[in-house]
Amino acid sequence: MHLRDGIQTRATVRQRYDHLVETKAIARDPAQEGIVAALDRLIDELCAKRLAQKSSALGWLFGKKRSHAHVKGLYIHGDVGRGKTMLMDMFFELVPARRKRRMHFNDFMTEAQDRIQKHRLARKNGETRQDDPIPPVAAALAEEAWVLCFDEFTVTDIADAMILSRLFSALFANGVVLVATSNVAPDDLYRDGLNRGLFLPFVDLLKRHVEVLDLDADKDYRLQKLNRMPVYLTPAGVQADRQMDEAWQAVTQGRVVAPATLTVKGRHIPVPLATDDAARFTFADLCEHPHGARDFLAIAGRYSTIFLDHVPVLAEGKRNEAKRFILLIDTLYDQHIRLVLSAAAPPHALYAGKRGTEAFEFDRTVSRLMEMQSRDWLDGWAARHAQGGAHAASR
């Protein structure tokens, strides 16, 4: 809270943004400042709507005119690394709504599909008489949060595409206000998707309920920072750990970082640290547990940058761990995932075994680890992920 003209006021997105600039955490960017202003305007509108709905004298005066007024949310799109998530997270922290949620859009849709399935099962078991699961599911979601903030709004799943129009019609009818970030404009969502014509009503609905803003910043700030840092750190130790932490902070700056879980065929893969498009594991997390190709594909399909800490030298007795490491690197390479890792030795010295197919196969791993450090590889990754979410769309 701040004092202005003797009156207590709330902190604004502008104040938070200016503080980051003044402390040199970020550089001032005119395109970002336009988004900052829009986010503050939205907070003001939401506060006014809440005030109008209260049973105060002011609420009584304006309630009939404004209590049912629809507040348009924001849909912020732009290339990777432009600061969309950082700005939305400032808004989420500052918007004075108790019932609010911030999550990755794919996670929200997984939850919605699970609730729809549970309703159908309840209808089958005679526990409810309501045939259509969309209205009660939307009502429950709206009751839990009327301000929804979604990161990485993208649609690649036909099951999601087919219900989005009805689900969000019901959410908006229940007064939900949406703030979303995306790599693509609304008109490019689900482009070339199966039965896209059935999806298009959702695009029209979305554009009626949000203001669409293009964050046309000219720099990828996260990539700039990471480009100055090595992506293969050896030998393992305090210095490598510090450099890994610095690189992780550069990639995740301004984003919510928390543990996550991926589900593959009913099994759960813990992700120790994750943000919208980056995840951090240790070698033990991925290679000392019985993970297979499907697990690594799920990780590569969800995150475009993987951090891997503490890769050891793999001796003869570590053949299973070596096989998983080989498979992991093959998967990340094939899916063109950016990899940042710390290791006990350079790539050519990581496998100490002399027998078995692992020794032969590890030659390929060495080659791929070397290539994934190259400027051409990293520039190719950046170009691919600047093309409107090509990473997600290709999965």
Image: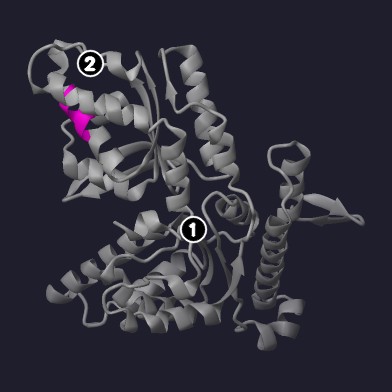
Residue positioned 50% across, 69% down in the render: 185
Is 177 left or right of 322, judged from the image as shown?
right
Q: Main secondary structure of the magenta part?
A: helix
Q: Which residue is mark 1?
A: 101
> Residue 175, image x and y in percent?
52, 77
Residue 251's disc number: none
- Snapshot quadrant of residue 160: bottom left
> Dot 1 surroundings within 10 Å: few (below 14), some, or many (20 or more)?
some
**Furthest residue to the front?**
376
Q: Quick check: is 323 in the magenta stretch?
A: yes
Which mark's residue is nearer the viewer, 1 or 2? 2
Residue positioned 47% across, 19% down in the render: 241
Residue 253 visible = no
Is 353 left or right of 102, judged from the image as shown?
left
SS at mark 1 in the image: strand
Q: Amino acid at mark 2?
A: Tyr
**Quarter that holds the C terminus:** bottom left
> Residue 126, image x and y in percent?
14, 76
Q: Amino acid at mark 1?
A: Arg
> Residue 215, image x and y in percent?
62, 61
Residue 299 drawn above or below residue 153: above
- Snapshot quadrant of residue 364: top left
Q: Which residue is mark 2?
A: 351
373 or 294, nearer to the observer: 373
> Dot 2 surroundings within 10 Å: few (below 14), some, or many (20 or more)?
many
Q: Which residues are magenta?
A: 322-327
Q: Quick check: is 170 in the magenta stretch?
A: no
Residue positioned 36% across, 75% down in the render: 164
Residue 328 drawn above or below residue 299: above
SS at mark 2 in the image: loop
